[in-house]
Amino acid sequence: MQWTPLGPNEEVDISNLPHRDHTLFLIGAAKFYLNNYLGLIDEPEFTKGVYELYEGPAEKANSSRTWYAHFLLVLAYGKAYSKGNNSKGPPGSHYALRAMTMLPDMSGLYADPVLAVQTLTLASMWFQSVDMRIAAYYHISQAMRTCIMEGMHRHMPEQIVGAKQSKRACVAFWAIYTMEKEFSSSIGAPSALQDEAITAKPPSQMNSSVDAVNMELHCVVLSTRPLVMCALQMHVENSDTFPPVVVPLTSTVASLLSSCVESAHTILNMLRSLDEEGLLDSFLPFQLDAAYSSAFILHLIKLISPSLLQDQSWPHDIEYIFDRMIASGSVVAPVRKLELQQLENAMAALIPSTEQSWGLAPRAGYVQEQNFATDDYFRDPFWHTIASNGVSGLLPQEILDLADRLDVEDVASTSSQ
């Protein structure tokens, strides 16, 4: 996908806009699915701008290019969620590509900085939704750095900037902050802003919506991933021995992994329930990422400690969710499903031919007899790569030892709620 930025003296393309009533329908669909990110759409000013556009299209579009780009991106999301899309390429791409030619440039001289960062973030989310992760990262980084330059990450006193502007900037910042964390981690890049630099008022306490609970469970799955990777590497390194060496997991580590399994099962069940209500999101990347992370971790635990997988319905749930997303036109779901199939094939070669209960710590004498050569083992460059990419420099044994000292009651209670 390629586009050429529109020159300052070039006329904006206002051709082939849908009828106003259809536009309002598409905007309503977009706002419904973008509900958690409504800090990116200012109401009622946005709707007012739509009516102004249809009263004088050329004047409105040319006088406020950033607003027009924002409008086109909202249309692109609405088109992505409308039924009967027969266009070539990602749904809504003709609107999105037109918007890309008018995105805020790198000069940083914006008449409305909040609108500029909202538009950049909508563009970034669209790129992420069609698996253009590098473009998504570039644009969300530009939005975040604009926030920093404009001081949106700092508390803006209402008595100085006004109550409306203070709230508007704060809500937009937290939406951008969330996206920047998500998109930077998806490509292994560090975050642009340290949390201790933030003094903006946090959003109100998270509600008990399905998306909020899904996010909490998703955090449990992601936070236990280093433990799973430690156990996986130990298992792979000793997969050729006979009889197979049991990976020694203490009861505490096994409890943490069990919480991870429960959270992954719950995420898959919630996504199936959303589909039954017609609410499964096949365009934005967040539900797909949650399903993929859950499936990924369950495939690994099947190899490491299959005794933790009491519920055997998860392979069917995974296939069902991905098939539903593919049937709904998801651009990325077929790729993620293929990746999971390749992972399953790779894991199958490492699974013992005879069923055994793996993972829980065996008797002390046995563990000593099968003790790993940890000093040599943990010098493997693999672990230095893992350590340098987000595990705070801890090596596998240190991670397992740290996990063994944790009080897992809070984690267990979270996953069981």
Image (cartoon, helix red, strand yellow):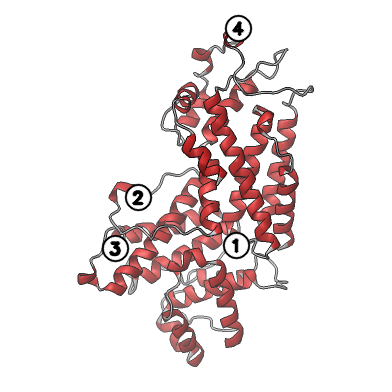
In space, the residues marked 1 and 2 are separated at their CA atoms by 30 Å
Q: Earlier in the sequence, mark 3 or mark 4?
A: 3
Please tell me which of labels 2 and 4 falls first in the chain: 2
Please state which amino acid type lies under the numbered disc 4. Answer: Glu
- Residue 203 in the image: state x and y as whole percent: 38, 60
The answer to whether 109 appears left or right of 32 in the picture is left
* Residue behind mark 2: 193
Residue position for label 4: 369
> Disc 1 marks which residue?
1
- Residue at (48, 46) in percent of width and height: 185
- How far across and how far down the image is residue 409, in percent? 48, 35
Q: CA distance from mark 1 to mark 4?
A: 58 Å
Among numbered discs 3 and 2, the one appearing first in the sequence: 3
- At numbered mark 2, what does the secondary structure look like: helix, strand or loop? loop
Dot 4: within a 10 Å radius of its alpha carbon, few (fewer than 14), some, or many (20 or more) residues? few
Q: Nearer the viewer, mark 2 or mark 4?
A: 4
Distance from disc 3 to disc 4, alpha carbons, whole Å, reads 61 Å
Q: Quadrant of residue 324?
A: bottom right
Q: Which mark is residue 147?
A: none
Q: Quadrant of the N terminus?
A: bottom right
Depth check: 290 or 391 in front? 290
Q: Earlier in the sequence, mark 3 or mark 1?
A: 1
Asked if the residues shown at circle 3 and circle 1 are in contact, with their CB atoms under 8 angstroms apart, the answer is no
Closest to the observer: 374 or 149?
374
Q: Residue furthest bottom?
A: 55
Ranked by sequence position, the earlier of labels 1 and 2 is: 1
Residue at horizontal 51%, vertical 14%?
374
Q: CA distance from mark 3 to mark 2?
A: 14 Å
CB within 8 Å, label 3 to label 2: no
Q: Which mark is drawn over residue 150? A: 3
